[in-house]
Image (tube, helix red, strand yellow):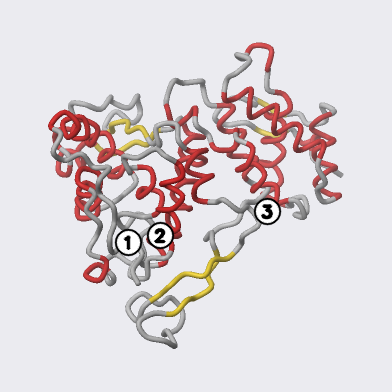
Amino acid sequence: MNPLENFDTSHWKTDDKSWMKEREKQWPEIEQMLYALEMTKKGRGIVKRYFLKGSLPHWKKLHDWDRDSTVRHLNLLLFLYLHPCQDETVLRSLRDQFMEHPQALPGDRLGGFTLLFSIGQGHASSGGTRLVSTSELEKELPLAVSQLPDAPAPYAHCKIVDIHTSGHNERLFNLMLPDLSQDTVQLPVTRDTYFSRAPRYFPWDHEELPLRAFRFALYDLWTMGQWLAFPATSSKGYNDMIFQYERPLDLWYQDVAKSAAPEGKWLEPVLIGLYRIFQFDLDNEPDESPRTRFVRRMRALLTERQFSESFQALVKLAKNDGIAVRNPWSDEPKLRSRSLPH
């Protein structure tokens, strides 16, 4: 049975003109983000119908279309984020239904995890925004050109698009990843959607796939440091950096706990990241700011939990002011040679 066959659309109040007007008002900002994330016009149209009316994609017709894209159309993240109901009991049930939907491609389900960390980590570390070409935007979303701010020089030919989930990164993480110890997932597949082998049974079978297409690494410390070094902004995406929250940071720890200290070209960015975490000036930061929350939590994790012996040596070096960085809070920090471990 298809768990979404009788999908409940009662949360979409399509007969309420005020409700529909508000949804239509919200859509342009969402579409701008999807465009900046490189979703096609066709994909955005599919998401729009879901956002406004609760219409689900025609999964069978789409199984061969744009299969390699991580933002094909309605993935798990967008399915939950754009649902009008905010009741977590309802959304948890919908999460399970979406994951058990046999006609959706594995990428439609698992791509949502990649997108969540792209928004909450990668884009957050660069201010929670993305630059898009004004000339290309004029072709795809002409009305957005006058609505979006210009990028500063030397990117004056671009517009700035906010990339965020309206402050819901932590909630979406908890909905999508209820069990941090789960590395793989049994996904239903059909003859059209199978990933690595044809199903043994009709109409569908299950395949075991990695829950995430990526694992975290010590190099993520560089990204975290970039976020701290970026000038504080009111951007929703910037202020919702996902590693300020306990469970996402626990997942990062699970992935890297046994990793040896990096070597060669990978060592410098990790040391700079550690430097920024331990040298960040909390005295001049609001007590409840996202950066304060992250730095306190990250310092505790780095100093109180068990890591590989070689990485713990780097943490000790950073904690004891043993790392020297030239222009540490600029766009081009440089590790001083005397800071390199011998």
Check whether the beta carbons of the residues at disc 1 and disc 2 lie within 8 A of each other: yes
Disc number lying in front (3 or 1): 1
What secondary structure is found at the residue carrying circle 2?
A: helix
Residue under the image location 52 percent in, 70 percent down: 186
Please provide percent x and percent y for residue 116.
Answer: 46, 46
Within 10 Å of the Cα at label 3, are there few (<14), some (14-19), or many (20+) other Cα atoms?
Answer: some
Q: Residue 103 vs residue 113: left or right? A: left
Disc number lying in front (3 or 2): 2
Pick the residue in front: 95 or 268: 95
**104 to 151, vertically: above or below:** below
Q: Earlier in the sequence, mark 3 or mark 2?
A: 2
- Disc 2 residue type (three-letter): Gln
Please provide percent x and percent y for residue 193.
Answer: 36, 74
Q: CA distance from mark 3 to mark 2?
A: 28 Å
Within 10 Å of the Cα at label 2, are there few (<14), some (14-19), or many (20+) other Cα atoms?
Answer: some
Pick the residue in front: 28 or 122: 28
Q: Which mark is residue 222?
A: none
Q: Indicate the quadrant where residue 27 lies.
A: top left
Please provide percent x and percent y for residue 216.
Answer: 62, 51
Residue under the image location 36 percent in, 78 percent down: 190
Residue topped by disc 3: 255
Residue under the image location 35 percent in, 32 percent down: 162
Q: Quadrant of the C terminus?
A: top right
Residue topped by disc 1: 4
- Disc 3 residue type (three-letter): Asp
Q: CA distance from mark 1 to mark 2?
A: 6 Å
- Disc 1 residue type (three-letter): Leu
What secondary structure is found at the residue carrying circle 3?
A: helix
Q: CA distance from mark 3 to mark 1?
A: 33 Å
Check whether the beta carbons of the residues at disc 3 and disc 1 lie within 8 A of each other: no
Residue topped by disc 2: 97
Q: Indicate the quadrant where residue 182 lies.
A: bottom right
